[in-house]
Image (cartoon, coloured by chain):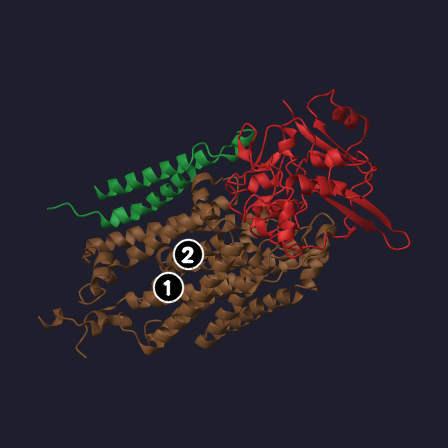
Amino acid sequence: MRKTWTWVTILIGVVLMIIGYFGSAPWGAAGVRNSDPRFSFAPALFVVGVVIAFSAALVYELLPRRRR
Amino acid sequence: MTKYAMVVDLDRCQGCRACTEACKIENNTTQGAFWMHVFRFEEGKFPDTKVSFLPRPCQHCDNAPCVKVCPTGARFKREDGIVLTDSDRCIGCRYCELACPYGVNYFNWQKPSEAYYSEVIDWEDADIQGITGGAIPPYKNPDLGLRYGDEQRRTAGGGQAKGVVEKCTFCVHRVEDGKLPACVDTCPVQALRFGDVEDPTSPISEFLREKNPWTLLEEAGTEPLVKYVGGKPPASHAKEIERPEVRV
Amino acid sequence: MATDVRSKEQLPQGVGRFSAGWKVFIALAFVVFAFGVFAYTRELSNGMVETGMRDVGTMGGATWGIYIAMVVYFIGVSFAGITVAALIRILRLEKLRSIARMAELLTVVSLILGALAIIVDLGQPVRGVINLFRYARPQSPFFGTFSLVIAGYLFASLVYLYLGGRRDAAVMAKYPGRLQWFHRWWAAGYEDTEEERERHHKSSFWMALAIVPLLIIAHSTLGFVFGLQVGRPGWYGTLQAPAFVALAGVSGIGHIVILSAIIRRVLRAEARITEAVFAWLGKILLLFLAVYVYFMSVELFTLLYATPEVEKRLSDALISGEYAWIYWGSVAVLVIPMAVLAWQALNRRWNVGLLVASGVLVNLGAIGKRYLIVVPSQTHGTLLPYEVGSYSPSWVEYGVVAGLFALGALLIGLFIKAFPVLPIDEGEEVMSRA
């Protein structure tokens, strides 16, 4: 269970990072839109993703043991 | 689609600096900020010296390094070519100032109300207030500080806020109204031209076709929209004379 | 049982016990910090005109000054923590374990200082923090610094420090006292079973492995902030990013040496922080120094052999002009310690005093080099024929920078009284009554 949750956390973190990064980076957009993120606070989402990905270590160590 | 450009005719410029002054008054730029600056530089050793003038507005580059490095997108390029700064979004990191090879950016180091030569003029003086009505600067342009363009951002004029970077806007507030930038309008010898280069029939397009335009710092790869005709690029050992002797 | 009743006087490593010397140190640090805050309020209310920075070009100034030099310096120092952690975990260098927590603490503190140094340099600081989270663009080299370094690396280092301290927190939590709640919270139910220890071993190995690429990217994007600017002679270049990483290693390990020596003296921990630890630190420092001095030499020879005309003004100012004293001074304080360290390495005899002196000197060199990266390319590096500029920091800038250093000292000083900075060993766990 512990390992599952750890991997889930990492996955969520990476997904948020990808969405946040490409949401912040308007590659190919022309004119003014090249200077705006695709959605507001996309960079915040990227940072949250990085934080969650590294929180996987906390999940791995701190998740309470299953009761015997 | 409109694409603006400016052409500077160095065979005509005689260094009167009317453009510099017109820009300052039109855009209410703060002390020490010269959005339009005219270099006077000399090359060679006496008695074989040569003195030249070179007006240097913002080049509104197609590959603008300042747009690339702005961390928040406050500095942006419009479809019509003009590069502007959103004074509401700028965080004052001054990275654009450092990325620009031409040195056209000016940061508001002080509160704007204190940045208009207050060491020389006492704006609080009763007599002066009688003339200015308390406005600092007294020639405040009402078109500045409003929102312009499809993007509706506050991009026109200097002295907008403490701690933001500003630069030449090709007088976006005038251009949107069908007028010419202040420098172009004022030049007594028509050394400056401005217009739509996407329109092959516009006067500026015809002018460019006749002449052999070059751009400043071509090797930097910035693709400026300001073209120069006549004269030649400053040699790398050229030295500036008459630097504006004003810091903030 | 007698051993269950522990009084707070017996907390290991002086935790919770405030000696007179410590109080004086904290008071001094606080005074300098308060002065820094005062200096910053001047800057906040009057604008950045209170600094010595001015616009590049017609105004003949430098628009980035010692604040940015300190940003690069502090982020560089943060290199140390993860380097030591990585060496311990990935290369199994168990000998360095005693200084691991100190190194991680240094990383966390210097990253905080680096982030603060960026904020004090912004013309609109509050807007800056909000707008970076709202609008930050990856096309700008700053994005990496903001999101990966400050957010990612800082968080990762905090997690690493936290998880690494749980075992000792569990030991500390058995002592009653004012700090027991803190130690209990930190321990989060750690029970020191074989299984928990194995789990921690695994997670810290993988974390160290994950943080290393984050670290390389972070320091490289910091180098890119400068190295990608075509318009600035002296900045544009492929060597910036690698040189940043190398000098980061130098300053970080240098700091660890200094911090280890201080802690060793203050906690009388000669048996824990042994000569072997200093020998290893000396060797690692020597390695980073050698790499950096190599980069420096390559750069110097290139400049001396052939300089493009546009860079000539700049390179002359660095080598023989206004900046020559900082340039050659920095070279000296980097090369001399390298020679001293090499000599010690060859003789396999390490002197702690010489090492600390080397640590101090290389950090002075790092500050000098960071300054030389930031400022001369602005005053002497314009591509258009502007006149040469000048920059000298104002008292406000010096005050704020001093305040940042003082804050770092405060944070470290407070930490070592709230938590054991050295890993607790068995001898300390079983405390006998005084």
Q: Colour of chain A?
A: green
- Few, some or many residues within 10 Å of mark 1 (<14, 14–19, 20+): some
Q: Colour of chain B?
A: red
Residue kind at label 1, given as amino acid type? Leu
Q: Which chain does the residue under circle 1 lie in?
A: C
Q: Which mark is residue C411?
A: 1
Marks 2,1: beta carbons within 8 A: yes
- Few, some or many residues within 10 Å of mark 2 (<14, 14–19, 20+): some
Q: Measured from the top left, where is residue B26 in percent x and y?
A: 67, 39
Taking B178 as reference, is C402 above or below it? Answer: below
Disc 2 from disc 1: Cα separation: 10 Å
Q: Nearer the viewer, residue B87 or C183?
A: B87
Q: Measured from the top left, where is residue C151 in percent x and y?
A: 40, 48
- Among the two numbered marks 2 and 1 on one chain, the one whose residue lies closer to the N terminus: 2
Residue kind at label 2, given as amino acid type? Ile
Residue at which label 2 appears: C112
Q: Measured from the top left, where is residue B129 in percent x and y?
A: 62, 49
Q: Which chain does the residue under circle 2 lie in?
A: C
The answer to whether residue B121 is seen in the rendering is yes
Which secondary structure, mark 1? helix
Taking B177 as reference, is C263 above or below it? Answer: below
Q: Measured from the top left, where is residue C51 in percent x and y?
A: 56, 59
Q: Colour of chain C?
A: brown
